[in-house]
Image (tube, rainbow, N blue to C red):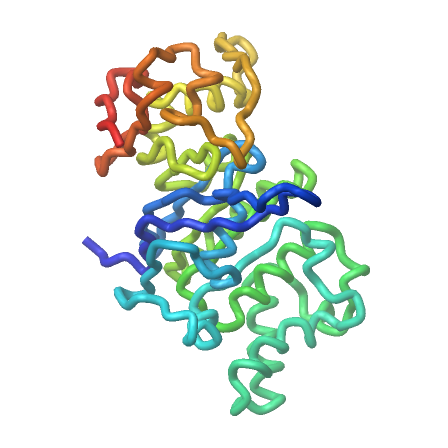
Amino acid sequence: MTNPVMQATALQWHYQVSGGLFGKPRTLKAVGGVDFALYPGQTLAVVGESGCGKSTLARMVTMIEEPTAGTLTLDGKPIDPSQWASLRQSVQIVFQDPYGSLNPRHRIGAILEEPLKINSPDLSSAERTARAREMMGLVGLRPEHYDRYPHMFSGGQRQRIAIARALMLDPKVLVLDEPVSALDLSIQSAILNLLVDLQERLQLAYLFISHDLSVVRHVADEVIVMYLGRAVERGSRDAVFSAPFHPYAKALLSATPQADPEARKERIQLKGELPSPLAIPDGCPFAPRCWKVQDKCRSQRPILPDDAHSAACFFPENGGAPAAES
């Protein structure tokens, strides 16, 4: 089997939150220990509600934020923060907002050439221009777009520019943080198909961050479901979508629209309040909202098993194996 390009082990990120004028600072565990591996030509999707830690995980993978604990490896070598400047060439990110991620004062050619100016100073101006024009063609932009400004493009075209910029340094890993959520539905499929085509051509490893499960179903090979900073289910796309083990994953999938108007689907309405990330309850974090909760769930925390398809749940759905206690 192909070796992973990047691997994360027990990755965590905590930060201190002010307790007010007289209160003590408190610790918010944005990511509480996540394991995953990224392989060439494959897509790992991370899904969950807003605030579950998806984007924080993306910031650690792209070496924007240093993990509080845990390790990241690139090509089998541990990532040292002192080497971030050189390693960032291998890991690039495409942001959610194609309007805010491009400098409105720079022409598209200058935006694409900037990564080369910073990281490949030995290239001549002609070589940088040739590389930028080549990348524009690869993402479906025309030659005359080189001298235009970002405000002259549609949202879909701007996201193509952002993808081209991320590919200028020939990365091995591309982090896609909600790359189509800000686009019209008519444009989303074109961008997703472009990403799939680029992955096949360049053998890129994708970390795809999204809350839209219909999009994830189209692009993912593996899926991680996160809840309050922790992975609660992990498995192949087909396994997770056809028979989710964790009740939270089942509830998420029940809210996904279906193309077949005659298909009947039971919508699971979660009751109870989402716990504060500053005061995550003992035991299973999903227990206050789970319809299968028992006393064991409130006192002991389930551990996500290291299986092909597993869930951090003592009483899983669809015949899943019960998780071990923490």
Which quadrant holds residue 281?
Answer: top left
Q: How many marks?
A: 0
Nearer to me, 281 or 268: 281
Query: Vertical placement of 238 versus 42: above or below?
Result: above
Residue 320 rendering spot, x and y as whole percentages: 25, 21
Residue 237 rendering spot, x and y as whole percentages: 36, 34
Q: Is residue 80 left or right of residue 260?
A: left
Q: In this view, does 86 lie to the left or right of 94?
A: left
Residue at the (57%, 81%) spot, across then down: 118
Looking at this rendering, what residue extends furthest in the left direction?
1
Query: Vertical placement of 322 versus 70: above or below?
Result: above
- Location of the C terminus by quadrant is top left
Query: Vertical placement of 261 versus 90: above or below?
Result: above
Looking at this rendering, what residue extends furthest in the front direction?
22
Residue 4 rendering spot, x and y as whole percentages: 28, 57
Residue at the (54%, 36%) spot, across then down: 278
Query: Vertical placement of 303 versus 252: above or below?
Result: below
Nearer to me, 66 or 158: 66
Residue at the (54%, 47%) spot, across then down: 55
Residue at the (60%, 54%) spot, across then down: 95
Nearer to me, 55 or 181: 55
Nearer to me, 164 or 311: 311
Visible in this render: residue 180? yes
Visible in this render: residue 170? no
